Image (spheres, grey):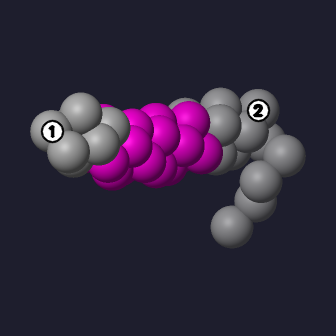
């Protein structure tokens, strides 16, 4: 039971970490593209 709880906790942590990573990557990519001039607002 303890190991299963730890596993679920790790999965939740990983999901949060991955979403944070993904949003960070998207922001960086948008910044780079806008610097190059592909994205024009």
Q: Which quadrant: the C terminus?
A: bottom right
Closer to the camera, 20 or 5? 5
Query: Residue extending furthest front?
Result: 1
Is residue 20 shown left or right of residue 37? left
Q: CA distance from mark 2 to mark 1?
A: 51 Å
The residue identified by callout 1 is: 2
Q: Secondary structure at mark 2?
A: helix
Marks 2,1: beta carbons within 8 A = no
Is residue 12 shown left or right of residue 6? right
Q: Position of residue 37 (x, y in %)?
A: 78, 42
Q: Is residue 1 magenta?
A: no
Is residue 36 shown left or right of residue 26? right
Q: Secondary structure at mark 1?
A: helix
Residue 35 higher or lower than 23, as above or below: above
Q: Position of residue 38 (x, y in %)?
A: 84, 46
Q: Position of residue 33 (x, y in %)?
A: 73, 39
Q: Tag 1 or tag 2, which sits nearer the N-term?
A: 1
Q: Position of residue 9 (x, y in %)?
A: 24, 45
Residue 35 showing in the rendered view:
no
Residue 39 higher or lower than 13, as above or below: below
Query: Residue extending furthest right?
Result: 38
Residue 23 showing in the rendered view:
yes
Predominant secondary structure, magenta span: helix
Magenta-drawn segment: 8-27
The residue identified by callout 2 is: 36
Instruction: Give the residue drawn at x 76%, y 59%.
Output: 40
Instruction: Give the residue drawn at x 29%, y 42%.
Output: 4
């Amino acid at each position: 039971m303890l190991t299963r709880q730890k596993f679920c906790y790790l999965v939740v942590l990983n999901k949060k970490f991955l979403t944070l990573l993904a949003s960070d990557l998207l922001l960086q990519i948008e910044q780079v593209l806008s610097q190059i001039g592909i994205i024009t607002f």
